[in-house]
Image: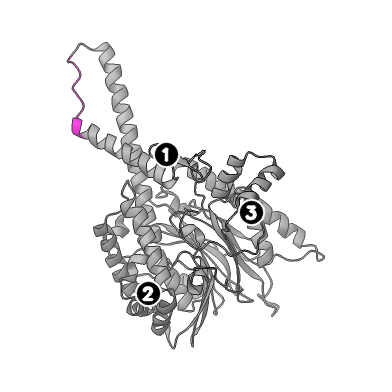
Amino acid sequence: MTADSGQDGVAEEEASREFLVHGSDVRQLGVELAKVYGARAQAGLRRAKQYYMVMPPISCTEAQWQSLSDNARQGTRLCCPVATSFFDGLEEGLGWNVYQALLDFEIYTLELQRQQRAKLNESSSSDSESSSTSSSSSSPAGAVGALDPEILEQASAELARERQKLQLEKLIPEEPCVATGDDGQTVEPPTKLPKPGRCTGFAVVDAGGKCDGSVARALLAQTVDLPAVLYGYADFDCVLRLVTPAGWVTVWDTDGRFCPIGLNSAGLSVGVFNLHDRHTDGFKQPAVTLQALTWELLLGQYSLASALAFIRSLAAPMMSGSALLLADAKLGAVTVELNPSGPVVGEIQRGLPVVRANHALLEQSVASFGATKRSRRDSGKRQQALSTLLAKHLDEAADASRPPLDAVTALAMLRNAKKVKNRATLAIIAMDPVRGELHVEFRDRHPVEDQESTRVAVQLGMALKAVEQALLRGALEATTDRPRLCSGAEA
């Protein structure tokens, strides 16, 4: 793959989709990466803090963020020696606490837990009001005690913050705002952004290469679905190619967040997924974050066998719930579900695909899985849609005249699977650990001129306002040679 050449007014480093970094060891690798990636990482952390700590309702305070980063540092030093050296080098080069940037899944979990508390408060408030009204209709005046005004005030404030959070997340102004264009006509504000989706993926290792001396084919692919406003609209997503004498690592990262999805020279491919777990013990003690664990597995040049042994032997708990897809050609493919109570490892598959989304698949994880019924249902539909498409393709691939499943085909499959790719998909990633290839379908934004919007409206038979709204949502795709937007802000 090649890096973008940049665009007018944007430094080449800011516009680049690829970085190649060499280090004499893992620590020096961190130092060298900080030199070319530090500004992007700092901007990404600033965006995260703006979203979670400033945008109401508050998901996390500065004190909480600092406490979690302290626990993450201690947990990493207890369990992840290679990642520790890498982060030490990053901190030397960055000059700030890199562990604050290794909490994406954990802070997101805090926000999910906050939302659940808000819903409980809303439900409790509604039940109390209903009970009070019902009792008042059949009881003498004064027979029913008044509700505690402090509780009502807290519930009302929480609901108000929840509404405001949704407004800001979806770019809905609190009060309708009126703007005028160059022609003096009223311009309506953009409608809400599409509801963020969730990641979906699969890993498959064929049955060859086990006894006959041939090399098995292996593949791991997934979508990455994240709130665009939180991750700079994918403008700064890139591929990091990191090289030391011990081997190489090639990963996709979003918005400078040090959240790798990729593979190493030992043949291990790693995919990551959010898995909302109700456990909170991991926030209160030294614990390992998903990002730290993933860097350890990749930079430590683990194989699938050694990775599973390492995960099972962690001396500290995981900080929050999450899931991994792991694959290598030697052993097979497997999903691992992680939470503070301990890792749960699925059955290693060879010849059959392992498909997952964002609901618990393994029995030991189901009890503490905390997502809503709606989220579980949506996750299940995405998993089923991809499973069906995979089964069809693998059946057809049994015909020798049909091409086998490869990384390019995997990208197309995820792109076309019903419900899997949506307007919140920032990237589609496919890895071939045998060939050492990482394929990424980035989400590029390009400026659109007024006459182009008008032409699209005529061609599609749509109202101009509808076309403009679709453009804002990223719902229209086109091929263009013009430079992409690289601002990290709403266009």
Q: Residue 348 lies in what quarter of the image?
A: bottom right
Q: Residue furthest right?
A: 401
| Residue neighbourhood size for the residue with mark 3, other residues' Cα within 10 Å, grouped as few (<14), some (14–19), many (≥20) | few
In-image side of 111 versus 458 (left or right): left
Which residue is tagged 1? 177
Name the magenta segment's main secondary structure. Answer: loop
User: Residue 352 or 256: which is nearer the viewer?
Assistant: 256
Of badges 1 and 3, the one in the foreground is 1
Mark 2 vs mark 1, CA separation in Å: 51 Å
On the question of residue 340 being in view, the answer is no
Which amino acid type is marked by label 3?
Answer: Glu
| Residue 37 falls within the magenta-colored stretch | no
Of badges 3 and 2, the one in the foreground is 3
User: Residue 86 or 337: which is nearer the viewer?
Assistant: 86
**Between disc 1 and disc 3, whose residue precedes?**
1
Quarter of the image with the N terminus is: bottom right
Which residue is tagged 3? 477
